[in-house]
Image (cartoon, rainbow, N blue to C red):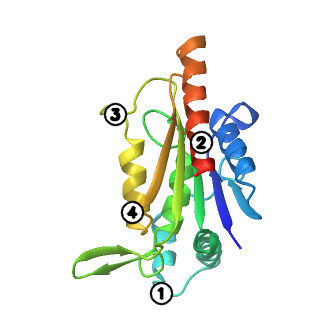
Amino acid sequence: MPHTLVLKSSILAEHSESSRLVDDFVARLDEPKVTVRDLAAVPLPWLDGEGAQALRGAGELNERQQALLALSNELVAELKAAERVVIAAPMYNFHVPVQLKAWIDLVCRAGVTFRYTEQGPEGLLRGKQAVVISTRGGQHHGSDRDLITPYMETVLGFLGISDVEFVYAEGLNMGGDARDSGLNSARARLEQLVAG
């Protein structure tokens, strides 16, 4: 059964354009199974030294480490079960929200979602598709200010996910026409993706 994992990361709740675009897109896909994680509404813990040891399976784990490892295992299981991952990645100060970074830190695990080989790292989650929807207040795509696109390509590729589509809604804080144009452009691209 097709399964889509949806990751929202906007701190703007019902005012979030990235969440709205994601919701509209997923509703049109008409997938039988969708798992939604709102990483801002239910934040994940930040990875620290103690947590990193837990994810590496280093030594005897205390109660906090056991809980973090169990959470990481749950997030990894959701990711492994999904054929498609839809990620809302709004631009905050030129990068992804810390809420999304926390998820990334908990799913990038050596020997679980990637492994090191003599030829370098190899992603273990091949065969999946990702759609990254990035909203921005200004115009950044294609410039050296767009740190999100190469970062998300690198992270997803590191996990073995190379089929990645990016959808941009830009100019959202630049006034009426720019905002409308940015949202309309994103909606049109999402319609194309739904149509296949």
Disc 3: which residue: 142
- Give the residue furthest to the bottom: 60
Q: Nearer the viewer, mark 4 or mark 1?
A: 4
Image coords of residue 191 (percent x, y): 62, 41
Quadrant housing the N terminus? bottom right
**Side of 23 where 83 appears, left or right:** left
> Up-down: is 39 above or below 70?
above
User: Which circle's residue, 3 or 1, is located before the other in the chain?
Assistant: 1
Taking the image as drawn, is residue 175 in sight? no
Label disc, if present, on residue 190 of the rendered structure: 2
Residue under the image location 72 percent in, 37 percent down: 13
Q: Nearer the viewer, mark 2 or mark 3?
A: 2
User: Which circle's residue, 3 or 4, is located before the other in the chain?
Assistant: 3
> Up-down: is 133 above or below 141?
below
Label disc, if present, on residue 157 of the rendered structure: 4
User: Which circle's residue, 4 or 1, is located before the other in the chain?
Assistant: 1
